[in-house]
Amino acid sequence: MEWRQKHTLFGVLLYVGSTVFVVYMMNGQPESKTWNALFWLTQLFVSINAVAKSFLQEHPNRFRYYFTLVRPSTFLLAKMVYSILLMFIMSIVSLLLYYLMLGWPLSHGGLFIIIALTGSLSLSTVFTFLSAIAARAQQNSALMAILGFPLVTPLLLILSKLALKALEPVYMPGWWGLALVLLALDVLIILLGVILFPFLWQE
């Protein structure tokens, strides 16, 4: 059912392409740290446009229909899986456009691709979880913004610091610790969603 709404996919693709093109026209090919910051800002807004609306666009009556078909945890995990796959595609497209227009100032390109995919998993998980809460709280989008800021801000800081490893050839201490914190945060959000969403579902 998500895949039928092709306008969302093409809208996000248009957003990514236009954003990268505007950055290229205004700034050319930036230095490595600016390139890194621009990439993660693009990923943030792509995830907001593509993932954060996954629950909010559902009509309340449709939730009642889903309630008769599947368990709430299954429904939430299915939404998360779709959001993760969608963000993986968007990340690959973003990397390709950045490579073509803004250059490739990376010392370890393969490592950055892995970090980008991991960041896509983290952002899609967080925004799917927040969208589920906001949708069941009387479609309150402001609630998602309030809850999202303290979750997304440290997430982006961790991702940008992890990405510096791919930008710089020198050793960076504490890199694996940040990676473990990021993975632990992802697991925690998934567990919270599986535990809390059934209670919101019944409301």
Image (cartoon, grey):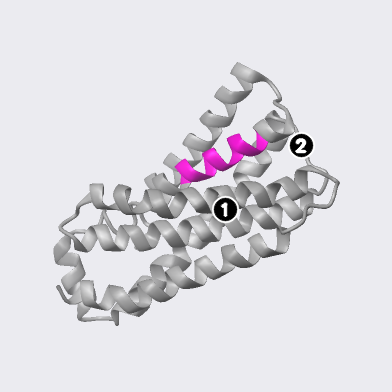
Q: Which residue is label 2 attached to?
A: 104
Pinpoint residue 33: horizontal percent, then vertical percent: 69, 35
Does 127 lie within the magenta span?
no
User: Which of the image's four quarters has the N terminus?
Assistant: bottom left
Q: Which residue is label 1 attached to?
A: 89
N-terminal of the two: label 1 or label 2? 1
Q: Is residue 15 placed above or below 63 in the rendered structure?
A: above
Q: Is mark 2 on a helix, strand or loop?
A: loop
Q: Which residues are the magenta region? A: 35-46
Pinpoint residue 187: horizontal percent, then vertical percent: 50, 72
Q: Which of 148 and 8 is in front in this view?
A: 148
The amino acid marked with disc number 2 is: Trp
Q: What element carries label 1?
A: helix
Q: Which of 54 and 132 is in front in this view?
A: 132
Asked whether residue 6 is in view, the answer is no
The amino acid marked with disc number 1 is: Ile
Q: Is residue 191 placed above or below 87 in the rendered structure?
A: below
Q: Is residue 58 left or right of residue 73?
A: left
Pinpoint residue 12: horizontal percent, then vertical percent: 46, 42
Total marks drawn? 2
Q: Is residue 181 left or right of residue 107?
A: left
The outermost residue toward the right is: 170
Q: Looking at the image, which residue is at 65% across and 36% down? A: 97
